[in-house]
Image: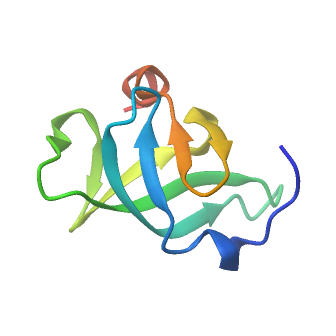
Amino acid sequence: MKKISAQKLSGKMVMDLDGGEIGILHNVVADAATGMLSELVVKPAAELDTSEFKEEGEYIVIPFQAVKAIKDVIIVDREGIRERA
């Protein structure tokens, strides 16, 4: 993946590989020791079944390893999410 600032990520739509809407990116979490991104904090879409996700208040947390692409939207692999939930 090419470099992109975290500020440009905020507010991007998060979708799965099949084009299903997951929600809107609210924040990113980085590992303080390595500086590597570890999680996406997402405001889930109203119709999303959040049972397969780790929840924190009104947000869901997606491991950064599940991210497959970042362009106009952020594409994640739901299988990667389930394996780490």
Apparent side of residue 9 relative to residue 84 in the rendered image (left or right): right
Residue 48 coordinates in the image, percent (x, y):
17, 46
Give the residue furthest to the bottom. 7
Residue 81 coordinates in the image, percent (x, y):
43, 31
In the depicted view, which residue is nearer to us: 36 or 26? 26
Q: Is residue 75 above or below residue 38?
A: above
User: Which corner quadrant holds the N terminus?
Assistant: top right
> How many marks do you count on the picture?
0
User: Which corner quadrant holds the C terminus?
Assistant: top left
Q: Residue at horizontal 51%, vertical 65%? A: 12
Apparent side of residue 21 relative to residue 41 in the rendered image (left or right): left
Q: Residue at horizontal 16%, vertical 37%? A: 51
Q: Residue at horizontal 66%, vertical 40%? A: 69
In the depicted view, which residue is nearer to us: 25 or 57? 25
Q: Residue at horizontal 37%, vertical 25%? A: 82
Where residue 10 sits, quadrant-wise, is bottom right
Where residue 24 sits, quadrant-wise, is bottom left
Apparent side of residue 54 relative to residue 9 in the rendered image (left or right): left
Residue 58 coordinates in the image, percent (x, y):
21, 68
Q: Is residue 23 above or below residue 19?
A: below
